[in-house]
Structures are given as C-alpha cells and as structure tokens.
Image (cartoon, rainbow, N blue to C red):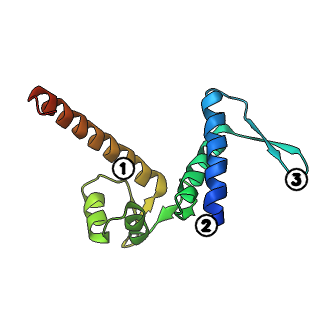
C-alpha cells in the first residue's frame, strides 16, 4: 500500500503526529493496547501499541511530505526493488548479497530478498555508523579538537 501526501495531508499528519507521540511518551508501557476514538461516531477502537508506533512513523514521513509504502516484513523483493529501498544501485546490492551482508535466496537464477533481511541490514549498518561517529568524537576530544 502506497501513499503520497498532499499539502493538507502533511498538515493533518503533523498535528496527528504530535498527539500520537505525546500519547506514546506519556504511556511508555501499555501492554494491553491503545484506545483510539473515531471522532465521527465516538466508537472506540483498541490498537496494538506496535501499530500505533508504526502509525507514528508513517505520520512522520507524511508530515515531511514524503510518500510511504507499507510492505509486510516477510515479503520478497526483486534485487531492483531491494536496491531501490536501500537507495543504492542494483550492482551495489548484488555485492552486498554476494558478501553475505544481506540474506537472500535464489529462485532459479533470480535472487529474492526478504524485507526483514533488508531491515536487519539497515539496523546493523546504522549501528556501525553510530559506533564510527562515537569513535571519531572520542578521538576529537582526546586530541583536544572539540
């Protein structure tokens, strides 16, 4: 499912995002679910907390005017789709697959990449980048360059 927000959508998303973030902050451990009131008829829905956290991410992208796609974690992507998700070239992605950085499987001669494998790679890559930045900051402090 894909969405490309217009100007009004971005404004509404910003307002909703503030309310959702405030709720999540004020209720950090809500194991039973999150009550959501539908304003038109005052019906109350109960959503899993994980769904509300996902919604906060969607709203943040919409508020910034960016489109959003929701893809199940178990979905399999072509190498071009996976490369597009990582914002890298297809040959670069193939290199990551061949190096064992991202899990994949072969279907005949074609590679398929699960979305959750891409997300695992992104988390590890983000962690490596943060660690490198922390090390650089520590070296800068040690050298008295800050």
Q: Is residue 97 left or right of residue 1?
A: left
Quarter of the image for residue 19 reads top right
Measure the C-alpha gap from mark 2 to mark 3. Answer: 23 Å
Camera-side mark, 3 or 1? 3
Q: Position of residue 146 (x, y in %)?
A: 16, 33
Q: Do we see residue 71 in this rendering? A: no
Measure the C-alpha gap from mark 1 to mark 2. Answer: 33 Å
- Disc marking residue 32: none
Camera-side mark, 1 or 2? 2
**86 or 66, which lies in front?**
66
Q: Which residue is mark 1?
A: 121
Measure the C-alpha gap from mark 3 to mark 1. Answer: 42 Å
Quarter of the image for residue 50 reads top right
Label 3 element class: loop
Q: Position of residue 132 (x, y in %)?
A: 22, 39
Q: Residue at x 58, y 68 (%)?
A: 4
* Whether residue 54 is situated above or below residue 106 in the rendered picture: above
Q: Which residue is mark 3?
A: 40
* Whether residue 141 is situated above or below residue 104 in the rendered picture: above
Q: Which residue is mark 2?
A: 7
């Amino acid at each position: 499912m894909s969405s490309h927000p217009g100007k009004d959508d971005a404004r509404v998303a910003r307002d909703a995002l503030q309310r959702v973030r405030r709720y999540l902050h004020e209720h950090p451990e809500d194991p039973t679910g999150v009550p959501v009131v539908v304003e038109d008829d005052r019906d109350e829905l109960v959503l899993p907390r994980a769904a509300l956290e996902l919604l906060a991410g969607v709203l943040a992208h919409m508020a910034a005017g960016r489109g959003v796609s929701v893809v199940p974690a178990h979905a399999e992507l072509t190498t071009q789709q996976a490369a597009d998700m990582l914002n890298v070239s297809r040959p670069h992605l193939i290199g990551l697959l061949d190096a064992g950085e991202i899990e994949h499987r072969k279907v005949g001669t074609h590679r398929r990449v699960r979305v959750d494998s891409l997300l695992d790679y992104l988390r590890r890559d983000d962690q490596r980048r943060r660690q490198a930045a922390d090390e650089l900051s520590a070296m800068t402090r040690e050298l008295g360059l800050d």
